[in-house]
Image (cartoon, rainbow, N blue to C red):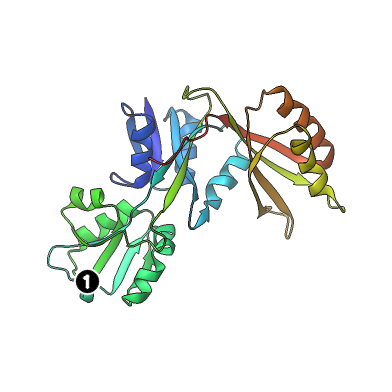
Amino acid sequence: MRVAYQGESGAYSETAVLTLFPDAQAMPCDTVHIVFSRVTSGEADFGVVPVENSQAGSVNETYELLLNSSLVKVSGEVVIRVDHALVANPGARLEGVTRAFSHWQALAQSEDFLAAHRIEPVPAHDTAGAARMVAESGRTEDAAIASVEAAANLGLVVLAERIQTVPDNFTKFAVIGTRDAGLGSADKTSLVMAVHDRPGSLLASLKPFADHGINMTKLESRPRRGAPFEYVFYLDIERASDDPDVLAALGEVRLHTSMLKVLGSYPGSKGPV
């Protein structure tokens, strides 16, 4: 089985892949968009992509791609503990580091540490890729924010561990594919909808879930691409999409929406790894 992920070997996304699919061939990709392309073309059986961090919030690129893909659905998820380390070439000292390279979310999650040590944040494609860039440069004034495992793979030294602002830092990854990944019985469904521009539309579109006893665990608005100052709403609900109460609720929701799409129905994560 081939499973695509965004990043390089040692990235947190690779950890997510091997947690869900221990025997899979992990396929590194430069971007989340390429992960989707590998899956839709059949080059990869599935993809594993970040959807939300407990500190930095949703990964908008992933949600935008899910909204616009007609082939890809979510069929699983896993939550990974993310402990960031400041890693550098041998001989580097913390007080001598002037720049830190990493994925923008890792930089955001570690901004207090960087500010306290007067280190300039520099965005990169992913955490493991940033570590490789630093290793290849040989510079001791540059560092990367990455995992301890990525540092070990590249012969880098760890200058500081657990540098994220919030100690309990987790990222949720979704399994995407054109077919079900077979990870278990679905008990969670992700949706996206747009409501009519009139008073009470959002309330009316959400009320059916309450009326049918369906718990909503996420509701987030995002700008609608190509429609300035219009919004779509992303929702997670407990229960599978073929549950009779969910089917009844969605039938009522459609009366109050201009667009409603099921992004996937899948077994929800039972806790962080």
Rendered residue at 59%/47% (across/down): 64
Residue lying at the far left in this picture: please name it.
91
Q: Residue furthest front?
A: 213
Quadrant the C terminus occupies: top left
Q: Position of residue 45 (x, y in %)?
A: 43, 27
**Which element carries disc 1, helix, strand or loop?**
helix
* Relative vertical location of residue 110 with respect to residue 79 in this rendering, above or below: below
Residue bearing mark 1: 94
Identify the amino acid type marked 1: Leu
Q: Position of residue 19 (x, y in %)?
A: 35, 34
263 vs 62: above or below: above
Q: Which residue is at the front of the view, 198 or 35?
A: 198
User: Residue drawn 52% across and 24% down?
Assistant: 180
Q: Nearer the viewer, residue 43 or 54?
A: 54
Expressed as whole percent of the image width and height from the top left, the position of residue 99 reads 30, 71
Q: Is residue 213 left or right of residue 272?
A: right
| Residue positioned 12% across, 67% down in the render | 91
Number of marks in the rendered image: 1
Quadrant for the N terminus in the image: top left
* Neighbour tally class for label 1: few under 14, some 14-19, many 20 plus, Cα within 10 Å: some
Q: Quadrant of residue 101?
A: bottom left
| Quadrant in the rendering for residue 272 | top left
Percent of width and height locating residue 253 = 79, 37
Q: With 113 as the anchor, is 187 left or right in this view?
A: right
Residue drawn at x 75%, y 46% is: 194
The vertical placement of 34 against 45, above or below, is: below
